[in-house]
Amino acid sequence: MSEVSEVSAVNDRIDVAEGAFGALRTQLREAATAFADGPDALEGILLGIVDDVDRAVREPLEIFPVCHHSPASALAMARRLREKQPKVVYLELCEDMAPLLSELRNCRLPVAVQAFATEVAGFPADWAPLSVVAPITEASAEYQAIAYALDTPGVELVLVDRSSDHVFQWQPRESSADEPADPDAPPAEEEAALHGDAVGVEIGDLRPRFAELEEHLLRHGRVRHWSEWWHQYVELPLGDSDHDTYRQVMLLIGSLFRRLAPGDPHRVRVDEDRERYMWTRMRQHLAATGVDPADCLYVCGAFHAASRVAEFGVHGADTFEISPPSGSTWQHGLIPSSHASIEAQFGLAAGSVSIAAAEWAKNLKRTRVRPFRLTGQAGTKKAATPERTAAPAAPAPAAALPDRLSGFLRRPPVLDSLDEAELLGWSVEIVRAARRNGYLASTADAIAVFETSILLAGMRDRAKPTPYDFQDAAITCIEKDTVPGRRDVRRLVEIMMGGDRIGQVGYDALPPLARDVHDRLAPLNLKLQQRGVRRALLDIAGRPELERCSDVLWMLSYLMPRGAARPIMGERRLGERPIQESWDLALGTHQRALIELGYEGVSVEQVLEQRLRRTAHDPRATAATVLQAVEDATLYLRSRRLADELGTRALEVLATERSVDGAPDVLRRVRRLLAYYRTTEPVLPAWIESFVKTGYAHYCTLLPTAFTDEDATVPQVAAMLGFLFSMESLALSLGCDRHQLELALAQSHPEELAKVALLWAAQVHLGRLSRADLRARCDELLRNPLVVPAYPQYLSGFLHALEPVPALTDFVVEAVSKAFAQLPDPVLLPWLPTLISTLRSGGAELAPLLIREAGRIFPGRLAALDAWVPPWRAEREAVRPALSAGGSGGNGGSGGVALLAAHPATCDAVARLLGCDEPWETVAAAPRGVALLERHPETAVALEALLTTP
Amino acid sequence: MSDLLRAPAEIKYAEELDWLESVDDGPKPFAWRLSPKMVRLFVLGSERADGLDREISQKWFGDRSFVERSIVTLASDRGLLLIGDPGTGKSWLAELLAAAICRNSTLVVQGTAGTTEDHIKYSWNVSMVIAKGQSRESMIPSPIMTAMERGAIGRFEELTRSTSDVQDALISILSEKYISVPELDSDNIVFAKPGFSVIATANSRDRGVNDLSSALKRRFNFVRIPVVTNKKAEAEIVRFRTEELLRRHQIELDVPPTLLDVLLRSFADLRASAASAGSDDEKLESALSTAEQIGVLEDAILHSNFFGERALTAHTLASSLVGSLARRAPEDLAILNKYLHGVVEPRSKEEGGSWPEFLEGGRDAIATLS
């Protein structure tokens, strides 16, 4: 030790001549000579580091280097702020985020400040939406600075880093693809995804830029990951050091990583540009306000503190030009964050942020430093006494710049002494936690964990087990071959060490939309701000005012990710009114999604309208999707205006469509909408009339091609026919011509057998083919052994024909029955699955039709089956004698007349209505035809004339 | 070259162990021959920063924390149970640890369905008993009992293959640390000397066959050894083991790095497909462990050395791969066939290199087998 004091005495003497770090320089120069034989790169690096530290320390504007999630940084910051009481704090954080920081007090930390842009200008379209998040935890230096600056009167907080817009401006265009995911990484947990796919920015990213260095440090530190290394070798030694030591060591580390490993050139350029940006902004602010640089504090990552750009310093060059922002519109807000998502976003080890938070709490207790905290900060206990600003300490004499580096570098790693009580506490607690989670853990395990932790720490050259050693020990002793519950021991230790903390954005800090949603859902009396799923029961019949809540919920379920609002009971369909609904709501869990909705508009209705419009005007939109948007607009917004507007758009889209892929969907939706409008509106909206008219012409035009086109499937063609036939009356009334349809059918010459059957069905519908002919054709097919194997395909066609021509149902039942009766098994059996799958896919509409018809035709009881003759066969048998009897209308006609005679009232009424007042005459039983001939001879005369003409 | 086909670790690395012992100045628990740090160094190899005069090669590849946790367990009073898929190096780690700690890795009980309590405790030399009566002389101690008497590490391979009642014989050994011999009137308790512990291995694929009782579970610390999926580490293991093998067989043969890459990638693909498979029929029966990979390579090397052109080709590698992995006639072959045509074929068109030959070899092998 005497040697050390001697050296420092010498140092002091040299300091006078060569600046504070003269001795260190000499020493390093000697070291470089010894290790690398003479002046070379090593010397350059080593001395360069000292130069960097020296320069930063001499800067008149005090630079305060920090590292993210470092309790030591936070502690040093709190101490320094109390001591120095700066008037201006410059902070390395996107400058456009400034207005939001005062809202932090309404939130439970950690939360993230977010900048969000949906409308992107000047960037590739596929980058949209742009999102930048800057998470803020309580155990961070930046929070200390923010809390100090916002709550101390007369102190200004200036954010100086590039704006969110520049984050993307400086991003390389061509390869925005993320790095491939690490295959060994564990799957991300739900909590880790709170930031979505935003770009993260953080103060004080301090980590070696090349993998080899990091690997080297980890291996020699006998630690598993970077967070542990940092904790062990920087955090602990710096924990109680004074301001100068802290500052110089942090600068040293920043400079070391910078000089050793410049890393990716693009990243270096961005980093340097940021430094230029920050210094330019600071100089601008200093010039504008005239503040003395000595009253300011510049908080930035240690990496940036050791900068060598020309713009560095209060007297740096003013050569950097800040590029103008792109045209994108940025929205800002706070979103909830969590320790896990911070770890996931910034590649930290799982649990490290939680451990840092625990460390921070412990350090506070130990050192009795009073941290800064925003007044009224949500989620913290009220301070017993109001925060009282300490009287500014006497400004430290600025002249002396002591060299703290030499001492720090020469000291062996500080080993935290073994805190036995703490370790015992952990051991007992983890066993209890394990027991609660289904492990068979006992006191013996607590002893074993305690012992193993100490052994492990000893093996890794540590006097005191770190939380990570403890975690390893607990896993070794408690984890067996299976995990009995939901959590394994690793996770239990993480939870015990502080666990994941999930932040929450307070009501007042929410965007208007989110506040509005919460206000409107207030009648439900649920604590929707809290995390977790709440069940909402809406008895709308009993409490009609809840219908408005139901409206909001339906819109949320449409707009938000699955699970945020999920209907359990109740549905929304056109023309129906809700009576009772129940919902599972997890708005607290999905707070980010709700807040991001808030960036799109001020109310859910507005956002929904925008979304629907966007869907409708999407270049890839089809008539079916636009019609869906129309339906949604009617369902959720009850907006006739928007529905009309979107409907008109559907019309446009339909007219330009050349494929028939969406035909089934279009048919279904138009039918639904027509039914709805017919029941609720006095007249049909103009757009739907035009839609039917245009659709009629459109599908008529496409029909011949669709029949022959191989890509058009049978259900699609069937849907087209369905549209044409079921909308026919409306279309004709609006001025369409039936000839168009008849011509289109005449032009259709399908080759696919199912489509042939479909065509036949259509012809029957139009009356160009009689049912008897159709039956004869089918019978012919069944009789021809060469065609029989193809018969099922015809049947498939007929099945689909039920959609456009439901009147054919009895015939289809007949055809299917005949197939079952007559087809040979090798043909029938392979076809059965096709039949079933066809019925299932189109089943909702087709199957009930078929079943009802079959129920009508087939006998309902077994006994009746013996005597049963299928109607088609009976018909044939009945027709034959009737034909032989010579003429139709024999029996039926006389029956009708008899009935008329028996009940003349109907006939009289009809006659009166038609204006025929002739009295009712009862015809005598005389031969009827002759009497008629006598009364109306004209017919006979005309016939005679016709026959006699040659 | 020793005249043993396969020398146990303490003989194979005897000289290294002697040297380590001579430089070891760390505190040693019980009667350990090396301090825990040196044991770790022996297993994981040395680095320049360790400041040793000679280099110690790495013998087991895997996460450092597994080794540390295992060593620490042995220094505590619990047994160590290494659990993992077949071929992950459990037994090798157990052997290395035993060799480093007590210079004897051969005190092994092999767990099988036929293992009885006698194999764990002791049995009698019947003819001696008839001649001289029951005495310590006529007793045949089990390897575990020998380990207790010497204060050494006893090993129990495939613990879960033996039946539960036999496993439970370990309970009293692990907690009371003695075995009583009720047949003897005097001198009827064998106490364990300090340093005694047990390393057991268990195959996680056997789970449910003979589950450990919770009393026994309590007395073991479980260290789960995962299948190596890190490509770099795996390449290292395969190279290390193959070199050892070539040396043992005195074969002069090059393993081209491209072929090694083909092997590693095909295993990675097969693992990925097994991970996404829905049922057992859709995945290979093999665990696709690193040991399996070494087996495939070994097979290919031997084949090309003795029957081939004395050079390893992709064709041989492929047929060896198919031959080793196709265990069930229709299912495994179908999967390999799917793999060859779905993955290798497009790749051989895109990348070329050894892949086309690999594809050819695979096809031939499948054609022969089916």
Image (tube, helix red, strand yellow):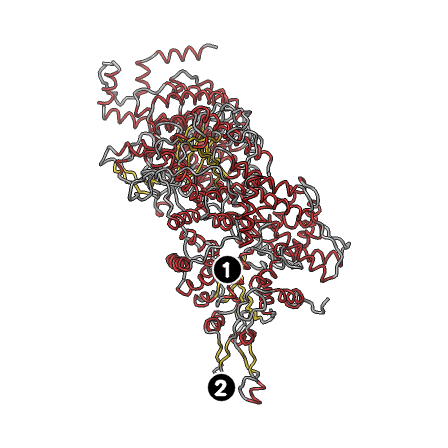
Label 1 sits on what residue type?
A: Leu
Identify the residue under disc 2.
B186
Q: Nearer the viewer, residue A680 or B156?
A: B156
Label 2 sits on what residue type?
A: Ser
Identify the residue under disc 1.
A456
Assess disc 1: are there few (<14), some (14-19) or many (≥20) residues with their C-alpha within 10 Å of its C-alpha.
many
Assess disc 2: are there few (<14), some (14-19) or many (≥20) residues with their C-alpha within 10 Å of its C-alpha.
few
Where residue A166 appears, x then y in whole percent? 50, 28
Q: Check the residue under mark 2 and report the chain it is in.
A: B
Q: Nearer the viewer, residue B86 or A162?
A: A162
* Placement of A79 over or under A308, stated as above or below: below
Classify mark 2: helix, strand or loop.
loop
Q: Is residue A802 left or right of residue B151?
A: left
Image quadrant assignment for residue A158: top left
* Placement of A22 over or under A420, stated as above or below: above
Q: Nearer the viewer, residue B143 or A302?
A: A302
Callout 1 and callout 2 share a chain: no
